[in-house]
Image (cartoon, rainbow, N blue to C red):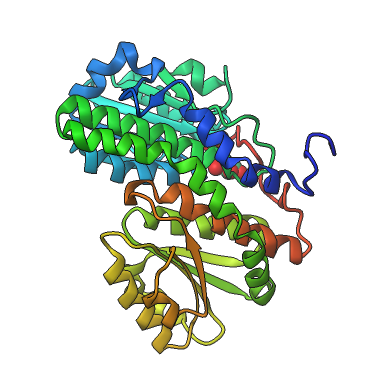
Amino acid sequence: EAIEKGGYEHFMLKEINEQPRSIADCMRGRLDSRAGRLILGGLRDYMNKFQNADRIIITACGTSWHAGLVAEYLFEEFARVPVEVEYASEFRYRNPVINSRDFVIAISQSGETADTLAAIELAKQKGATIFGVCNVVGSSIARSTHAGSYTHAGPEIGVASTKAFTAQISVLSMMALMLGYQRGTLPESKYMELLSELEAIPAKVEKALKLNEQIERIAAQYKDARNFLYLGRGYNFPVALEGALKLKEISYIHAEGYPAAEMKHGPIALIDEEMPVVFIATQDSSYEKVVSNIQEVKARKGKIIAVVTEGDQSVKKMADHVIEIPRAHEAFVPLISVVPLQQLSYHIAVMRGCNVDQPRNLAKSVTVE
Ligand code: G6P
């Protein structure tokens, strides 16, 4: 096991650190921005169905469902196609309205999640085309779908998913760019620009990983907190959900993720000087709005930990801690902004003496209902 951990104390830390490589592996042979090439072999025979779909339905559980939420923003922005993101466990029992013009994407690291499998069977019966985004080759979900693309992140051992999440988003980003280009909603110049933006992500993740020591120091300050709030908007809203999930899974601290603007409809009541609030406040189209949400928390004396774009000055004046990540196109920021949140949850859990790789009550793959 020590050899498998490659010198790291835990699989989770190893997997967090593998992300520059796993994201690059996921894009290898598929994306070549200089040649203007983007190919997903699994989509070849189904491109027609994908392109002409009336609607995309994404179904998944847990962290994979969060990747699906990021994809909703990607598909709608680049391909202008309506998207619904469904918890597989709800979808399968809801008698959903679905037909042969729907394109269903099932996302699963393990490819064995019982609810996701059942959702696939249901959608299949109703005549939809089902596309799998799985990490485990030859898994049940990979076999039960019409077609699919593997995430190629390599084996993920830590129960809390990290590198599988960023690999899922990488595949979904490539799918969104292909779809936008084919549907004519993404002009060629923009498409080419986005290809190189996406290709630049692994190096930026590598840079973000260097923040580890700073994050360890922040973790030491907040490890005894009883609650945490995670807030983001736009592409960073699903990242807020994922950051909160990581923390509760492995450190057993109660954490909630929320769209920052929705805070005023409830969570704001929780804010006092004891409450750490993690903002993902990168410089994108919702930046100004997030900054005013930070002010609202500040006014109530919450402790602010903000993930910002390198060089940001405004948030620095308000936040207790700023974590500066490299600038990227806003659609691909989740691939970078989630990394410090993974590290934060990891360090807090280690400091609290928790079993990081095998948290209580959780399983790596949930093969029962
Ligand atoms: C379990 C795991 C999570 C995972 C979820 C979905 O709850 O602990 O890490 O996100 O299942 O798993 P899947 O393999 O379908 O992505």
Q: Nearer the viewer, residue 113 or 14?
A: 14
- Please tell me which residue is depicted at 17% across the width and 27% down the height of the picture: 183
Quarter holding residue 290 = bottom left
- Please tell me which residue is depicted at 85% across the width and 39% down the height of the picture: 2
Q: Above or below — where is 182 with respect to 209?
A: above
Q: Position of residue 173 (x, y in %)?
A: 36, 36
Q: Position of residue 365 (x, y in %)?
A: 62, 36
Q: Nearer the viewer, residue 367 or 203?
A: 203
Q: Is residue 86 visible?
A: no
Quarter holding residue 137 = top right
**Residue at the front extreme of this rendering:** 34
Quadrant of the snapshot with the C terminus:
top right
Q: Is residue 131 visible?
A: yes
Q: Is residue 235 left or right of residue 60?
A: left
- Please tell me which residue is depicted at 28% across the width and 38% down the height of the picture: 193
- Please tell me which residue is depicted at 48% across the width and 59% down the height of the picture: 325
Q: Nearer the viewer, residue 170 or 260?
A: 170
Tell me the quadrant of ligand 1.
Answer: top right
Q: Above or below — where is 319 with respect to 109?
A: below
Quadrant of the snapshot with the N terminus:
top right
Q: Position of residue 200 (x, y in %)?
A: 43, 40
Q: Is residue 68 left or right of residue 272?
A: left
Q: Position of residue 270 (x, y in %)?
A: 46, 80
Q: Nearer the viewer, residue 280 or 127?
A: 280
Quarter holding residue 259 = bottom left
How many numbered marks have been drawn onto this rendered protein structure?
A: 0
Q: Above or below — where is 339 with respect to 80?
A: below
**Residue at the top extreme of this rendering:** 45
